[in-house]
Amino acid sequence: MTRPQAARAAASEEPYAPSTDPAALEAIATGEHGDPFSVLGKHPSEGGWAVRVFAPGADGAEVEDGSGDRRPMAKLHEAGVFEASFTDQPGTYSVIAHNDAAEWRFVDPYQFGPVLGEMDEYLISEGAHMQLWRKLGAHPMVHEGVEGVTFAVWAPNARRTSVIGDFNGWDGRKHPMRRRGTTGVWELFIPELAPGTRYKYEIAGPGADMPHPKSDPVGFQSDLRPDNSSIVRSLEDYTWGDAKWMAERSARHATNAPISVYEVHLGSWRRRPDGGWLSYAELAETLVPYVKDLGFTHIECLPISEHPFDGSWGYQPVGLYAPTSRFGQLDDFRAFVDACHAAGLGLIIDWVPAHFPTDAHGLSKFDGTPLYEHSDPREGFHPDWNTLIYNLGRQEVSNFLLANALYWTQEHHVDALRVDAVASMLYRDYSRKDGEWIPNRDGGRENLESVDFLRHLNSTMSEITPDAMMIAEESTAWPGVSRPVKDGGLGFGFKWNMGWMHDTLEYMAQDPMVREHHHAKMSFGLNYAFSENFILSLSHDEVVHGKGSLFSKMPGDAASKLANLRAYYAFMWAHPGKKLLFMGQEFGEHNEWNADSELDWDTQKDPGHAGLSRLVHDLNAAYQEIPALHARDCTEDGFEWIDGSAEAANVYAWLRKGEDGTAPVLAVFNFSGVEHSGWRLGVPQPGFWREVLNSDAEVYGGQGRGNMGGVASRPEPSHGREHSITLTLPPLSGLYLKLETA
């Protein structure tokens, strides 16, 4: 017995007798103990209480309790396990450890009780915790009167899980976590840590494999690649200033509201002079007013969740709960959202629940087993993107994703989620050959687990955050994507109209001389325009990977390309459905999108391209100001054909109608290369039809041909109507005429 041990034994009512099993001490010392709280911390012992701590590298240690009582500790294991005995249960204690080189002091984490409550455990185990991010992850807090950070992570098959970071030399032996029953959750409160702490989890799988470091799946911020460490951040420090917006946003997202979206990749919209990314603060000062001035109602960001590979544009995220630190910190992103709302703009983010990358620090085999992904590659590997597919049939995985959707709309006031790659989720044979996929339980190709997840997701979102939009990027004919779940649909609010995009771009790429042979391509979308709540999308996917910009897709010389684009945009904004345009296409950028550099802003110096941008502004203004152009975007009573069969002339004409009592708008398009003068069209009502927009106006870079402000109807039948008007249709143009009412 050493001198300190003898001194402590003399002061105790019972002889000093360390009772810890040597095998348990060895497991603590080597980082192989699955239940460190059974050994470390405060424990009743014969004659009082024992305090055991692990201080690797220490030659000696002392313990000091809350009363200031400081006493030496006995070394139970050469690796640094120490023990001291107390007659009475000690209060909160600190440990002073030392070796020949240094002395250090710490508050022992193993003296504290659990943080997770029984209800949290129950909800997590049931896959039903709607605020999962409030319990998992890293949270600064005061626990049992002590400031620190509590960590919690789901790793049910791990034999040991530890928190590692700068604070412990990334040594997984120092802070092993407490397993919480059958939930699969491990937790640990570490005193004296604070926001800004860098950390990971070191997870030892169920076999004999070496432990591996993992970023926090529910971490709120991460270091950039290649470090990929998670960073402790508080969700409580930001003060929002958008109460008015949040109170009103439900009306802004209704099917009868004007919704016009500017899609943007934050890293390549603009760059700093040195080529670096703009920060969230700089984007708030530049992007937000730019989009506002163009008249859009929403900004849609390509995924902003943390992702290791720049070239994925965010579509292979690892940190679903972390706004990417490429542009700043957590609260910087919130300030960007606030700036959008202050300007009257909603913010949509692309959200990726379909798949995740195989990066070693991410979700792949997170606890040493296929946990978030399917174990069978025929279900769990995506051949198109070399990624892993979430096992949505596992309730904890489904809960992880569902809670993430709520997290963005509740904690960050994001107004909508555009759910990526829905088609890949709906079909088990998506991009797979025969023999490369497993049928569902009924022998079919539908992914029933994904269908259940999407319906549960949208039902939950509509119940908890009914004022937020859910938008599907879904490219197949799956029925009822935007119909309510109670009616058998998937429950999304809107669906991207991918078919319209492909058909109309194919038409627009044709020389006007041969367009009459492709006439139905342009109008086919109107056959199904009201089968879903559609968003007409000219997205990033159409201007990359060799597809060229929209400008480059148009036929003819530069002037003709611009005229075609002006007519096409006028067609799009008059067509039923909400609108989406990818950045750079508003001014007709020549080159296809390059995510590694900024847009070619010099293009706007050309008057024709500046005119195109002015047209987009005026289209947005007309769309918002004239109810007929938006109020019945999603119902067929808001649309009426006037003439859809003028193939030889490449002319289309229709009426858009708003709520009862509002004036209709006549939209007329000439996609031929020649002017049509004296073109007669039937109109539903007599009166003066004012030309409110002409894409050939000089201010847009056109030739200024048109109808001198408008035309009066005449009682001459045409197109099945008793009254008609006679128009001049400039080549490659779109006209809007609005009936003037008293």
Image (tube, helix red, strand yellow):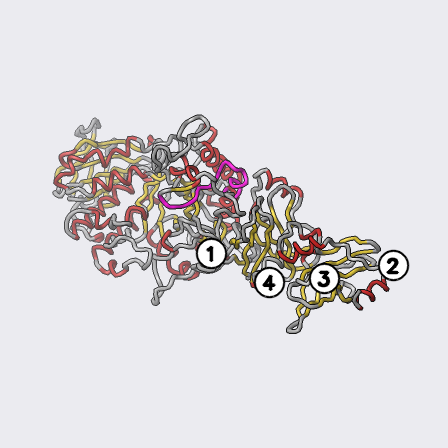
- The residue indicated by pointer 1 is 333
Q: Quadrant of the C terminus?
A: top left
Residue mark closest to the camera, 1 vs 4 = 4
Residue 179 is situated, as x and y percent measured from the top left of the image, at 64, 47
Name the secondary structure under disc 2: loop
Task: Give the residue type that dot 2 points to.
Answer: Glu
Q: Residue at x 46, y 48 (%)?
A: 414
- The residue indicated by pointer 2 is 13
Q: Residues within 10 Å of mark 3 (few under 14, many from 20)?
A: many
Residue mark closest to the camera, 2 vs 1 = 2
Q: Sequence-wise, which precedes: disc 1 or disc 4? A: 4
Choose between 309 and 236: the one closer to the eye.
309
Name the secondary structure under disc 1: helix
Q: Quadrant of the N terminus?
A: bottom right
Real-space Cα separation, disc 2 to disc 4, in angstroms: 37 Å
Disc assigned to residue 168: 4
Task: Give the residue type that dot 1 points to.
Answer: Phe
Residue 299 is situated, as x and y percent measured from the top left of the image, at 39, 50
Q: Residues within 10 Å of mark 1 (few under 14, many from 20)?
A: many
**Would residue 471 be counted in the magenta stretch?**
no
Magenta residues span: 384-401
Residue 478 is situated, as x and y percent measured from the top left of the image, at 37, 32
> Which quadrant of the view contains residue 431?
top left
Real-space Cα separation, disc 4 to disc 3, in angstroms: 18 Å
Real-space Cα separation, disc 1 to disc 4, in angstroms: 30 Å
- The residue indicated by pointer 3 is 82
